[in-house]
Amino acid sequence: MENIKKELVEMMNRALELEHAARIQYLSHAELLDGLNSEKLVERLKEIAGDEKEHEDKFRKMIGSYLYGVPSMKIAETHVANGAKNIFEVNLKGEKDAVDFYKQIYKKINDEKDKLKYEFTTLEHELRHIIIDEEEHIAEIRQLLELKE
């Protein structure tokens, strides 16, 4: 395997582990919400967990089918939270960390596109869409927290 592909497999496996953790964390946090208006928040956390599952699937496909690597079965660290505000703060930080890391992968793909002759377009496209989804999660969580960053 070429060095760039090996490096991308390592980075995308870390991303896959982050997505594993995010999905489990959102599902667990959804079970902790209760009280007035919690039904819609629980529903949305479960929907976001579904988005994270789609991201896992995309990373697995990019790693296996395009970079000929072995997708990770590990999980990144998860974070306990209590109460709606803390749950959203914890997940907002996770989303921001993910976007920052995914943008590093995105830059590497673009910087090395000449070495990814038959993979570049798909890798760039899929990763860009994952970043867009994560940025939507950030905007939504900020709105729920009423943050005007």
Image (cartoon, grey):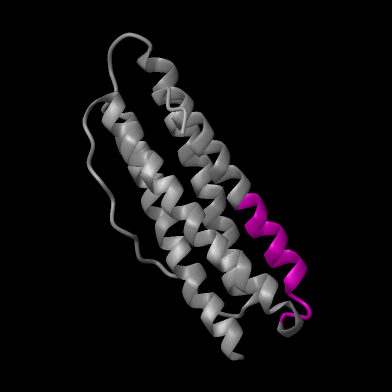
Q: Residue furthest bottom?
A: 2
Main SS, magenta residues: helix
Height in image: 146 above or below 65? above
Q: Quadrant of the N terminus?
A: bottom right
Question: Is 113 a magenta residue?
Answer: no
Q: Is residue 1 visible?
A: no
Query: From the viewer's perspective, is 87 left or right of 96?
Result: left
Residue drawn where x is 34% and y is 30% of the image: 30
Q: Is residue 21 visible?
A: yes
Height in image: 133 above or below 70? above
In-front residue for pair 83/59: 83
Q: Residue furthest front?
A: 149
Question: Is 120 a magenta residue?
Answer: yes
Height in image: 35 above or below 99? above
In percent of width and height, residue 81 lies at 23, 36
In percent of width and height, residue 13 lies at 46, 69
Q: How many marks?
A: 0
Residue drawn where x is 56% and y is 60% of the image: 103
Query: From the viewer's perspective, is 41 left or right of 6?
Result: left
Query: From the viewer's perspective, is 44 left or right of 65?
Result: left
In percent of width and height, residue 16 lies at 47, 62
- Residue 112 picture quarter: bottom right
In-front residue for pair 100/39: 100
Write down the region rendered in magenta.
Answer: 116-130
In percent of width and height, residue 28 lies at 30, 37
Residue drawn where x is 59% and y is 73% of the image: 64
Height in image: 58 above or below 10? above
In-front residue for pair 89/12: 89
Residue drawn where x is 38% and y is 47% of the image: 94
In-front residue for pair 19/68: 19
